[in-house]
Image (spheres, coloured by chain):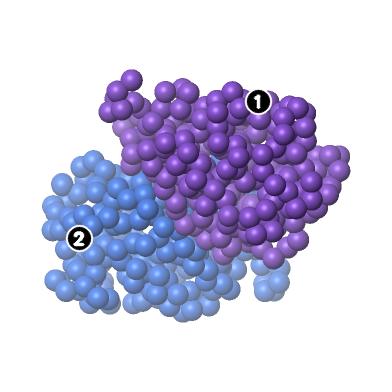
Chain colours: A blue, B purple
Amino acid sequence: MNEHTRQRAVILASGGLDSTVVAAVAQRDGYEIYLLTLAYRQRHAIEIERAAQVASALGARQHRVIEVDLRAIGGSALTDDLPVPKNRSEQDRGQGIPITYVPGRNLIFLSLAAAHAEVLGASVIYFGANVVDYSGYPDCRPEFLRAFEAVVQAGTKAGAEGRRIEVRTPLLSLTKADIVRLGLTLNAPIHLTHSCYDPIGAVACGLCDSCLIRKQGFADAGVEDPIPYAVS
Amino acid sequence: MNEHTRQRAVILASGGLDSTVVAAVAQRDGYEIYLLTLAYRQRHAIEIERAAQVASALGARQHRVIEVDLRAIGGSALTDDLPVPKNRSEQDRGQGIPITYVPGRNLIFLSLAAAHAEVLGASVIYFGANVVDYSGYPDCRPEFLRAFEAVVQAGTKAGAEGRRIEVRTPLLSLTKADIVRLGLTLNAPIHLTHSCYDPIGAVACGLCDSCLIRKQGFADAGVEDPIPYAVS
């Protein structure tokens, strides 16, 4: 397909495994990809650098970083000086909304992505939300995603002019092992990804919920995780 | 009412006439007010300073400024280096979506306000949207506001736990003259407000849509506008 006729898609890119696989899915679907990373003064700011490397490895048309200071809001272990839970059992991880939930984060991120999509003339946002491993996050649920499309429809120039902006979440119902396998199939640059909530320098801690879920996913898929961990 | 039992309300405070009157309405309604200003790298950054003065004059419990770089998105005369339209007729102002529309702005602002409200335990956001003078902005319409409440309900911890966050827009159907009169009745610090899209230093230009609407509002109310204009 000609570069100039390809449709544009905005990818919410955190530099993590899920969003990197999602970007590869968007490319497979034929879109010219525009990666968008939010610098929200997160504890794990290394992910911004990794997102840039992922964008480059994928040959993205653009990688845009938008700063939004969620530390001014607080209320999360990812933006406050609260301890990130470590080495929790699967059962503990499955209970309630974790302290690593950032209030309103996906709503804020999708709002920025929708505004960016509107300016770019993109009709699709790809978003790596997943309900299997992150059942505790209310802003990953399908009803939230549909409500979000409705508010964009009602409140943007694009919506007023009849252009829909669709939110696609191809990983929503996949297990982490499925996501690993899909990433390998699509040659996604998994070796560049970063998933840890509380890295030691650039090295994943190996003990936070995100590391535990990722390691289990690679184990279940029977594949070696290419990234190093402080505690393997 | 005891200070410690008063309910909290978040006010989206731009330092302008409308949001200042809205903050005074929230106080009249009995709320402890938490003003929230978005520093979005807008052309008229003077409004951040004015919002702080307004918060102080009203005795707000808090004035929080959150930075979000909408210049990275662009697409508006308020964040790009595009000229702000000047001296347009009422008829021209009423047509279509103006270039001063910032893509997704109210969605982004309300999303940040909802996250802030969630952390504060506030159940209400007061927002100075108005459909009389700003009919061209899709993100001031009632259907957008209801859709926004629905997405917050679906996607936040507050919503998941059954706490609603309501968006109140007491100015929605008021004329600018009504807003001026209401502000005077409530002793809102109108003299500190700033409405201009394209100020010369701290002085309102007097010719942009926002200045023209404000001046007409004061004229219609038969009240002198206490702020200076470069062109009166």
Q: Position of residue A220 (x, y in %)?
A: 23, 62
Occupied quadrant, residue B220: top right
Residue A40 or residue B133, whichever sits in front: B133
| Residue at 70 percent of width and 37 percent of height | B225
Q: How many residues crowd mark 1 within 10 Å: few (<14), some (14–19), many (20+)?
A: some
- Under circle 1, the secondary element is helix
| Residue at 65 percent of width and 25 percent of height | B181
Q: Which mark is residue A169?
A: none
> Does residue B43 sit above or below B60 in this rendering?
below
Callouts 2 and 1 close, C-beta under 8 Å:
no
Chain that bears disc 1: B
Is label 2 on the same chain as label 1? no
Give the number of callouts: 2
| Residue at 13 percent of width and 58 percent of height | A87
Please indicate, yes or no, whether residue A25 appears anywhere in the rendered image: no
Q: Position of residue B167 (x, y in %)?
A: 50, 32
Q: Amino acid at mark 2?
A: Cys
> Does residue B149 sit above or below A76 in this rendering?
above
Chain that bears disc 2: A
Q: Is residue B5 left or right of residue A2?
A: left
* Quadrant housing the N terminus of chain B: top left
* Alpha-carbon span between mark 2 and mark 1: 56 Å
Q: Nearer the viewer, mark 2 or mark 1?
A: 1
Q: Position of residue A27 (x, y in %)?
A: 54, 68
The residue at which mark 1 appears reads as B181
Q: Amino acid at mark 1?
A: Arg
Residue occupying the far top of the picture? B1
Q: Which mark is residue A208?
A: 2
